Amino acid sequence: MNTQQNPPNRPNCFNCRNFYITYESSHPYGCRAMGFKAKKLPSLVVFESSGLECQLFARK
């Protein structure tokens, strides 16, 4: 169950072809396009660090 909520205008990582689930419990979510793993959804990390919505979202 995903407890993180995306605002309606933010890209949903679960619908992105670059998103993947890792096997690392400390960093369960990954983004192939940006090349990182994180504890939060990649779109949230991108927004928190840059103030911009993800520019590499690619719908599945």
Image (tube, rainbow, N blue to C red):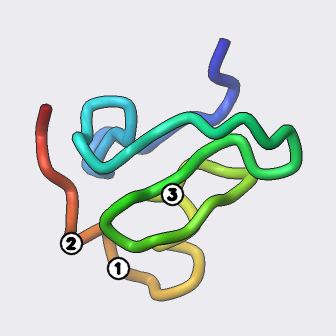
Estimate the x, y position of residue 31 in percent, counting from the top left: 44, 57
Is 29 above or below relative to 33? above
Estimate the x, y position of residue 28 in percent, counting from the top left: 71, 41
Secondary structure beneath dot 3 equals: helix
Find out whether the residues at labels 1 and 2 contact each other: C-beta distance under 8 Å.
Answer: yes
Q: Earlier in the sequence, mark 1 or mark 3?
A: 3
23 with respect to 22 (left or right): right
Q: How far apart are marks 1 and 2 (CA)?
A: 8 Å
Q: Between residues 24 and 57, which one lies in front from this camera angle? A: 24
Q: Mark 3 points at which residue?
A: 42
The part of the image, by quadrant, that contains residue 22 is: top right
Could you tell me the amino acid type at mark 1?
Leu
Q: Which of marks 3 and 2 is nearer the N terminus?
A: 3
Residue 55 badge: 2
Residue at 44%, 83% (x, y): give it. 51
Q: Between residues 28 and 46, which one lies in front from this camera angle? A: 28
Could you tell me the amino acid type at mark 2?
Gln
Secondary structure beneath dot 2 equals: loop
Q: Mark 1 points at which residue?
A: 52
Estimate the x, y position of residue 6 in percent, counting from the top left: 46, 41
